[in-house]
Amino acid sequence: MGAGHGHGHALGNTTQHGHGHGHGHGHGHAAGHAGGRHRWRLAVSFLLVGGFFGVELAYGLLSGSLALLSDAGHMAADVVTLGAALVATRIATRPDTTGRRTYGSYRAEVFASLLAVALMLAVSLYVVVEAVSRIGASAEVASGPMLVVGALGLAVNLVALFLLRSGASESLNVKGAYLEVLADTVGSIGVIAAGWLVAATGQTFWDTIVAIAIGAFVAVRAVSLGRQVFAVLGQHVPAGLDPALVASDLGAIDGVKDVHDLHLWTLTSGMHVATAHLVTDDQTRNHAVLDQARHLLRAQHGIAHATLQVEPADHLGCDELGW
């Protein structure tokens, strides 16, 4: 047992060299952190969207357009989401000085994404309820301001989308902000469409129909993002990873007789973690097994941080764990 644990610790040192950092989570890792790399994009988008929110809210109230007000509501959610994402990336890249956060504070980004989901669902629910309550009621809608403000909002959102798009595929936190802005972009297009239809037909019900459509679109995107967030919080196997294949690849390493207690999960976007016990029949090959296993997990499965314990074939007990 002592040999197994000793070599497990040896891998911890090897893994640190692979990471370029230890569990102190120093500043050196921030540069390689997906959310941290795209923080400036979040900041610029926050300033753009926040600056335009007040304009859209004012014109929404003046024009009486539910579609414009719903889009302003989405933009308000954008402001909160982008602000939370900015705070989360700062927390995530901040070194731990307490010694209590052995995994750092990277999960802050996941919780920010969860906030984005909650806001998107809340806004979409409000819009749909308000739109349904207007069915059959008469309302004055000024189509002119709808068209002008909708076009300006679309321009602002397109710039923000362009800034956030590259980071959305790397960071769940940035993706939450990106989907919020995407929903608001669709909302701006809806506002323009509603304004044109009201102006062309004189029928204000188009404003209500577009508002409901916007709410439904946002809800679908929120649910999709929510599933990804809960998969991370629930420590599910990361998307694209097959535990059976990972175990098979580790078991194929020369000297490994068995693999058990394999666990795979995601700490935050782009940071996959693994733990496993490797049973060997030749203790003289333990260092080579550890080196090959670390390289295999990183190169073939994208797992940069793995804690592996090597056990002699005659060691009993560890494989009896129930989880």
Image (cartoon, rainbow, N blue to C red):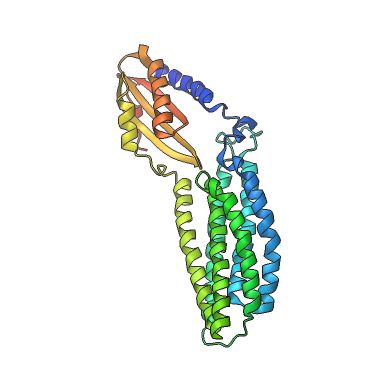
Say whether residue 101 is visible: yes
The percent coordinates of residue 277 (x first, y second) are 37, 27
Front one among 221 and 280: 221
> Where does residue 40 sit, x and y in percent of width and height?
65, 45
Pinpoint residue 315: horizontal percent, then vertical percent.
Answer: 33, 20
Q: Which residue is nearer to you in this view: 196 or 130? A: 196
Which residue is pictured at 53% across the width and 67% down the height? 124
Can residue 111 be seen here? The reply is no
Quadrant assignment, res 30: top right
Q: Against 178, is 193 above or below?
A: below
Q: Quadrant of the C terminus?
A: top left
Q: Position of residue 179 (x, y in %)?
A: 53, 56
Q: Residue at x 44, y 40 (%)?
A: 265
Residue at 59% in and 70% down: 70
Total labels drawn:
0
| Quarter of the figure that contains the N terminus | top left
Q: Quadrant of residue 99?
A: top right
Residue with the most extreme top position: 284
- Depth check: 285 or 189 in front? 189
Query: Is 257 placed left or right of 36 in the picture?
Result: left
Q: Is residue 74 above or below residue 110?
A: below
